[in-house]
Amino acid sequence: MDEDDVAASRRFYENTSEREQITICMATHPPKGGLWKNAYADLSCQCDRFILVLGGGYTEVPDGFLDKNKKHDIESGKMKIVVAGKDGLPEDKGCQNKFMFYGDFPGYYCTFDDDIRYS
């Protein structure tokens, strides 16, 4: 995608009154490291909500896990990071964690793998 494509995509996805909401959910665990960040960079401009479920040994969101841009997305409500098995969430089920919120949001619910580039 070039810059014009990205700009057109953002305009479409910012106009939520004319379309269904799009939720993306992804699961990750410590051995994958920061691979999810590449997928997030590729997909975040194409959704209204991005949920990252941490499992496989994560007990909390680690310090330094997020850069400034992702912190902004959390503050704006676009991104949410949760830990499987914590705060009343279901227990950790590995890669199946990405289905944890299926049916909880109106519109489209899409799941993606954390170790694939989508650009």
Image (cartoon, helix red, strand yellow):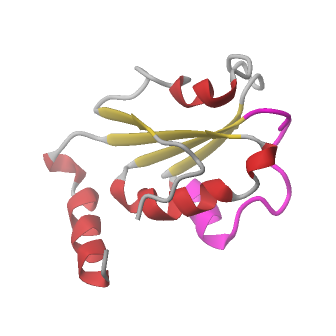
The residue under the point 78% across, 25% down is: 86
At which x and y percent is residue 99?
52, 25
Quarter of the image with the N terminus is bottom left
At which x and y percent is residue 98?
55, 31
**Residue reaching furthest to the front:** 116
Left or right of 73: which side holds 5? Answer: left
At which x and y percent is residue 81?
65, 44
The residue under the point 61% across, 63% down is: 70
The residue under the point 82% across, 63% down is: 64
**Would you place residue 50 above or below residue 101 in this image?**
below
Q: How many marks?
A: 0
Pick the front one: 79 or 114: 114
**Would you place residue 60 above or below residue 76 in this image?**
above
Q: Is residue 63 magenta?
A: yes
At which x and y percent is residue 8?
21, 71
Left or right of 49: which side holds 51? Answer: right
Pick the front one: 75 or 22: 22
Q: Quadrant of residue 103?
A: top left
**Residue reaching furthest to the bottom:** 3
Q: Is the magenta region chiefly helix, strand or loop?
A: loop
Magenta stretch bounds: 55-75
Quarter of the image with the C terminus is bottom left
Q: Is residue 91 magenta?
A: no
Q: Quadrant of residue 60?
A: top right
Pick the front one: 101 or 28: 28
The residue under the point 68% across, 37% down is: 82
